[in-house]
Image: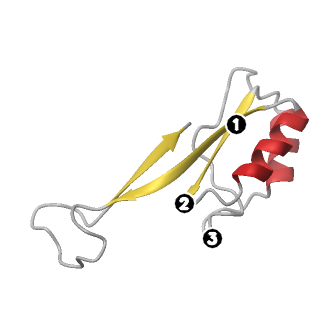
Amino acid sequence: MSDSFVHLHLHTEYSLLDGAVRIGDLMSKALRCKMPAVAMTDHGNLYGAIDFYKQATKAGIKPIIGCEVYLAPGSMHDKKKVPGLPNAHHLTLLA
């Protein structure tokens, strides 16, 4: 893989039922692939952000912390469909 390639949308073990990679394994793979940076964008949480940051900096990889958030057309308490709109969208935010 090119040393200029960076994953900007990646779910770790902290994305329940969706992420598969453990942070330590991710750093090992990123080093083997000579990635200068990698992002963590778990679903709706930042539970792994501190562990991710510490392991990335220790490995010499630039950590990009993010989150995949959910956008709904109305209130989270309103369960009715809005005509002509999907129920929700995902948006990846990077810091």
Depth order, front residue of 74/2: 74
| Res 16 label | 3
Classify 95 as above or below 66.
Answer: above
Could one spot residue 32 in this view of the protein?
Answer: no
Tell me where residue 5 appears, x and y as whole percent. 67, 26
The local crowd at label 1, few if under 14, some if 14 to 19, many if 20 or more residues have their Cα within 10 Å, is many
Spot occupied by residue 23 in the image (x, y as percentages of width and height): 80, 53
**x then y, percent, for residue 57:** 83, 35
SS class, disc 3: loop
User: Which residue is found at the position 63% from the left and 70% from the top?
Assistant: 16
For the C terminus, give its image quadrant.
top right
Residue assigned mark 2: 43
Residue under numbered circle 1: 38
User: Viewer-proximal residue, 37 or 74?
Assistant: 74
Q: Secondary structure at mark 1?
A: strand
Image side of residue 22 versus residue 79, left or right: right
The quarter of the picture where the N terminus appears is: top right
